[in-house]
Image (cartoon, helix red, strand yellow):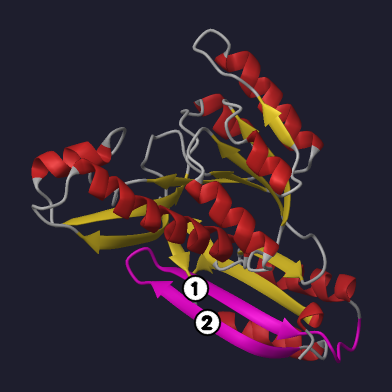
Amino acid sequence: MNNQKLGTLLISCPDRQGLVAALAQVLSAHGVNIVDSIQHTDRGAEIFFQRIVFDLSEIATDRDTLGAAIEEVTTRFSMKYRLRFAGENRKKVALFVSKYDHCLYDLLLRHQMGELDCDIQMIVSNHDALAPVARQFNVPFSLLVKTKETKAQVEAQELALLAKNKVDLLVLARYMQILSDDFIRKFSGDIINIHHSFLPAFMGGRPHHRAHERGVKLIGATAHYATADLDEGPIIEQDVIRCSHRDEVSDLVRKGRDLEKIVLARAVRAHLDDRVLAYDNKTIVFE
């Protein structure tokens, strides 16, 4: 199968009879073959979710005509939908960092190896420590130092950079700054943050110190969409690792960094692969 001939359709809508049949029929009518389909219904909220991957190799019409037909069905059933064809609209990504390099290196290496289907447009930081990493991977680097007094001005510069580079996804790869509500509202794409704790435990700063003080036996990491409510956005991915009374704070930090890389990469890949639907401050993540 030619992966460049695939399309992906994500939908969510109020649950009712005939949804699966309607989508299958419109795809079939255009000579499109469904190669993967997975669905879920939130019984409490009565919301239906579906992800369909289809093969366009023998399409009887064209992509524009198919898109118009899909839009007609989604309108009729009050569906929210995202449609993407492989090879088109490749997502553009920006990475925001501070001084920690583990998540940045991991994402850049995975991208270099072809694991992340996107274009990394730029790296933005409030420190110059990771500029050599950007040069190593030939990614444009912007140093924008942010203070309490200059925060609004610098955020305006950041938003201008995102717009100029047509960024679809912003990844906070241990960016140790809190984005303002205004920034989050104005950025039209999605923002993924990695938090070095198993949320909702130990929100905010120094989670490893507080975990050590509490004597927990598990620590974790959480990747979530950033919202105006700090560390409370829809969770995309989480993982944990065991710890014991023998572990010092430095041990928890070391173990936590391993988790952060893996969890952030999983979340970014799921987003890039159109496997995530957010609703009601939580997510559906299709496998």
The residue that disc 2 covers is 38
Residue 109 pos. (x, y %): 62, 59
Q: Nearer the viewer, residue 206 or 19?
A: 206
Q: What amino acid is at disc 2?
A: Ile
Q: Within the image, what quadrant is residue 30 found in? A: bottom right
* Magenta segment includes 55: yes
- Describe residue 10's horizontal placement relative to residue 249 as left or right: right
Span of residues in magenta: 33-61
| Residue at figure coordinates x 15%, y 43% from the top left | 212
Q: Nearer the viewer, residue 80 or 265?
A: 265
Vertical comparison of 188 with 158: above or below = below
The residue that disc 1 covers is 286
| Residue at figure coordinates x 76%, y 47% from the top left | 138
- Describe residue 269's horizontal placement relative to residue 32 as left or right: left
Of callouts 2 and 1, the N-terminal one: 2
SS type, badge 2? strand
Q: Quadrant of the N terminus?
A: bottom right
Q: Within the image, what quadrant is residue 94 found in? A: top right
Q: Are marks 2 and 1 in contact (CB under 8 Å)?
A: yes
Q: Nearer the viewer, residue 218 or 243?
A: 243
